[in-house]
Image: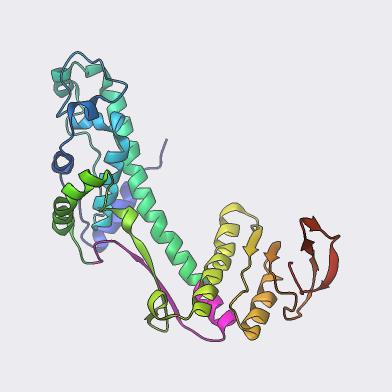
Amino acid sequence: MRPDRTADLRALLERRILVLDGAMGTMIQNHKLPEEAYRGERFRDWPTDLRGNNDLLVLTRPQLVGDLHRQYLAAGADVIETNTFNSNAPSMADYGMEGLVYELNVAAAQLARAGLELATRRRAVVDALETEARGLYPTLAGAGAVNLQYCAALGPEAGVAEFLAALEARFAEEVRRGQTLVGPHRDDLLIEVDGRDLRLYGSRGQQRLMALTLRLAEVEPVARAVGSPPVLLLDDALSELDLHVQARVLEHIVMAGQVFLTTADATLPEVRPVTWWDVRDGRVTEPILSAVRGAA
């Protein structure tokens, strides 16, 4: 049995106003689904018409329902409702589906919870990475204030109305291309150093170092989550970094647990003794204990 979140909800309501999602029926109608979409494979031969039975989509089109939940969350909703407006025996009797009421309610609750969990985990991951990267990047680069921001595709100020307008505006193109163009799958991550977007204004070396920083920033959160440090696989991670930065990176990773680092450069800065292998023509030499000078 899942824990009761009533106390958490009341605590949030005491601190601020919570935003409830909008109508699922309106969102579903925007997709103009044909009869076949409602039936799916499971109800292909059902004796009555099923078009308009929006609650049934939690069984036949769960991806669509999940996407709609995530779109409301991306638009700023704090609370989402299950897609079960008609999941009761009297309403389902119109389709001869009274026996599916329990299954519909369970499936709808699972989809709503999955959408909420996805958005929540994304933000939690970004927060955890930012905490690590703020200390790690300047240590490796020598300087630089890091800011990470989870960016909803429609912008931080977009509300439900703006989101619905965007869905309506892109609907014809979505049908033509056979894919959803508006939603949390279009969200992005903004990475800034000293207040500047690294994607636009960072040098190649800075971008490479940030990519490495984000990989290294995963170590502590993963270790806390699973109870042991992960094995790091870093492929050609030092290329395009100057020698001073390379030395700082090597000093850090030799203390980061078990790390496999590949490089084509045989003249890396020497740091603490490590084990390295030389790979030539598909052959791997016996391990040698040495200062870093090749692939560690």
The total of numbered circles placed on residues is 0
Measuring 61% from the left and 74% from the top, which residue is drawn there? 239
Residue 99 belongs to magenta span: no
Nearer to us in this view, 45 or 90: 45
Residue 134 belongs to magenta span: yes
**Above/below status of 159 relative to 56:** below
Segment colored magenta: 133-156
**Above/below status of 113 relative to 10:** above
Based on the displayed image, in which of its 4 quarters is residue 260 positioned? bottom right
Q: In this image, 96 relative to 192: left or right?
A: left
Residue 144, percent from left and from top: 49, 84
Measuring 77% from the left and 74% from the top, which residue is drawn there? 293
Quarter of the image with the C terminus is bottom right
Residue 28, percent from left and from top: 18, 40
Residue 58, percent from left and from top: 28, 33
Residue 162, percent from left and from top: 15, 59
